Amino acid sequence: MTSFQETVSFIWGVADLIRDTFSRGKYKDVIFPLTLIRRVDQVLADTRPRVRERHEQLKQLGIADMDQQLRRASGFAFYNTYPQGFADLLGSPQHLYDDFRAYLNAFSPNMREVIEKFDFYPTIDRLREANLLFKVLERFSQIDLHPSRVPNEQMGQIFEELLRKFNEATNENPGEHFTPREVVRLMTRLLIAGDTGNLDQPGVIRRVYDPCCGTGGMLVTARQQISERNPQATVFLYGQEVNPETYAVCKADLFMISKDGKDADNIAFGSTLANDQHADEQFHYLLANPPYGKDWKADKDAVEAEANRSGRAGRFGVGLPRISDGQLLFLLHMLARMQPQANGGARVAIIMNGSPLFTGDAGSGESKIRRYVCEHDLLEAIIALPEQLFYNTGIATYVWVLTNTKPPHRRGTVQLINATGTWTPMRKSLGDKRREINAEQIEAIVQLYQAGADVPDLSLTLPTTAFGYRKITIERPLRLRVRITAERLAQLAPTPKLLPARTPPDAQAAWLADLRAALLALPHNDYDDCAAFHADLAAALHQRGAKKLSATQHKALLDLLAERDPTAQPGTDDKGTPLPDPDLRDTEQVPLAEDVESYFAREVAPHLPDAWINRDSCDAQDGQVGTVGYEINFNRYFYRYTPPRPLAHIEADLHALEADIVRLLREVLQP
């Protein structure tokens, strides 16, 4: 193999051997674990004799706990004590099944845990039953995956490309698992560029965390770039992953590049939202690419229980997004795991699609989360990336950069960077990925961020309040015309809302007769003023010795006799307060920087003179009129109107098309 693509093609070629035994969705059950085992085996090849010798010595001495000494013998945090290597097993085909299982069981406990995440042993049994075990192992023995031949970053890309192929075959979403390397480099550069603290000091420590770490690409890339900036920095990696296969790949990769194995030990398995296994940790750099548009139903009970139990002191007390999309839950989780400002602070880079920018009305969970981020001045910048950048989707994506240590010149502001046009076409597409961002373009974006200046069409800095608004409720009076007709009177019936409370069944007919008689005795059968209708009806009922109607009864009667009429008088209650018409109720979004009364006087009152603000609708947090909401409509700030072509040009094109159609028809119809 001489290239990345050839290596991927060779490994994927195993599918030709197993296609009659395994469905396309099960190819990864064979290919993924064997790719990993082959690479691990080659890593251990040089020290295998030393490990075997030391193992025999310790056995003869009767030492049960050999783990640490065998680690030292192998030079890694893992080892294998089997006398033969992967390729050597093929020398005895008749014993291959037993030898291969014994070989796997001879791995150190930490590496066995990794392999077990693939649930590989049933797959071995199935390969044996189909007489494929020898052929498949022989195929993998022919590939060289040693780190000296395939560097760790390239191996990560190979795993990710295989994963893309697996998910493409089963119509799954590979975007749940990994991010293009250039996007990771951009995210890391943004974090480092904004770290104006002690990053350049000798021996500085940086703890890097990814709550949905996939194959570990973000973590490894982050460490590489930190080390490039400061070779004397000490970097510790932490992560958690819910997918067993990608968790195993991440863990194995970190075992191979971390001599003491501590980074691999810091990778936890399970759902970050439901079972945070780094709950007592805090980090300097936090990066993530949470799944887009994926529901969090599986974590719902645990997330809601934590939100109710801990409130604002927990991860999710700020608010919960809709169940169909959990991206903002990961953002809240990351904010809760930031190093506090007193300890040097932290920086966050998270990539999400457009939904978290604007989905959710004022008072919704999404809006509450955006409000929290802006009002606590945590959001530093948002970068809009080019489309067609990811393997599984061409949709727009955005990098959010957040920190609790904003420099003075950024406080109270958010920088928006439009990098949608910053891309290079790929020579060969990978799935939906047709574009990439090269090193020079990454640097150009970072320089825009560092400068923090407004650049037409590229960069704009706004106050955090620019994204906030008050959603006020606008009421208009209920205008009803009461028409008393024979048809409507015939519809009077003893309904619970119309009858007086506790009216005996045998008295209901008499009461309805009195009401009908009172209505017929009214001086008018057409009222454009409900207050006048009220007064006349009360008087008519009094003359008949009946009580006036309650508010509930009156409403039930109006539902039968009244109709909306814009020319009617505004309705009022007993205290003379105007009654609102629910059908005419509307809302207005008032920018936070503007006074509600001034906005109403300018934008509403001139057009609706009878309207008023519903002052009972107040924000639950600050108690003022209207509900506060936040949204970041990115396109609003960078949209450029393109006028349509002149009408004369369009007409000329239409005439030309008509002429072409006529010509073609003549050619068809000519004998």
Image (cartoon, rainbow, N blue to C red):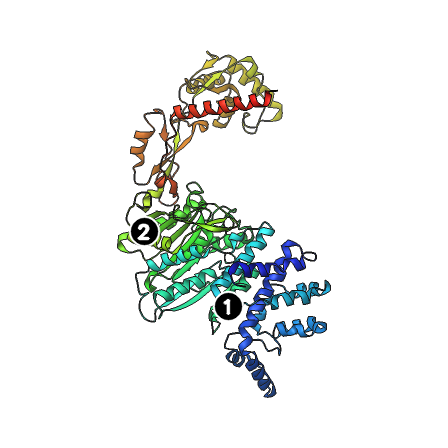
Closer to the eye: label 1 or 2 = 1
**Relative depth, front residue between 196 and 654:** 654
Q: 473 above or below 271?
A: above
Residue 243 image position (x, y, % from top left): 55, 58
Q: Quadrant of residue 111?
A: bottom right
Name the residue beneath numbered marker 1: 149
x 60%, y 64%: residue: 33
Name the residue furthest left: 409
Residue 114 image position (x, y, % from top left): 57, 67
User: Which secondary structure lies at badge 1?
Assistant: loop
- Tell me which label, 1 or 2, sits earlier in the chain: 1
How far apart in space, not on screen, are marks 1 and 2 (Cα)? 37 Å
Which amino acid, mark 2?
Answer: Leu
**Relative depth, front residue between 605 and 502:** 605
**Relative depth, front residue between 518 and 230:** 230
Residue 500 image position (x, y, % from top left): 54, 26
Horizontal side, residue 74 vs residue 475: left or right: right
x 39%, y 23%: residue: 648
Which amino acid, mark 1?
Answer: Arg
Name the residue furthest front: 671
Residue 628 at least partly seen = no
Q: 98 above or below 470?
A: below
Q: Residues within 10 Å of mark 1 (few under 14, many from 20)?
A: few
x 30%, y 30%: residue: 602
Residue 318 image position (x, y, % from top left): 42, 51
User: Which secondary structure lies at badge 2?
Assistant: helix
Name the residue beneath numbered marker 2: 448
Q: Which quarter shows the C terminus?
A: top right
Residue 131 at least partly seen = yes
Horizontal side, residue 15 vs residue 563: left or right: right
Q: 652 above or below 617?
A: above
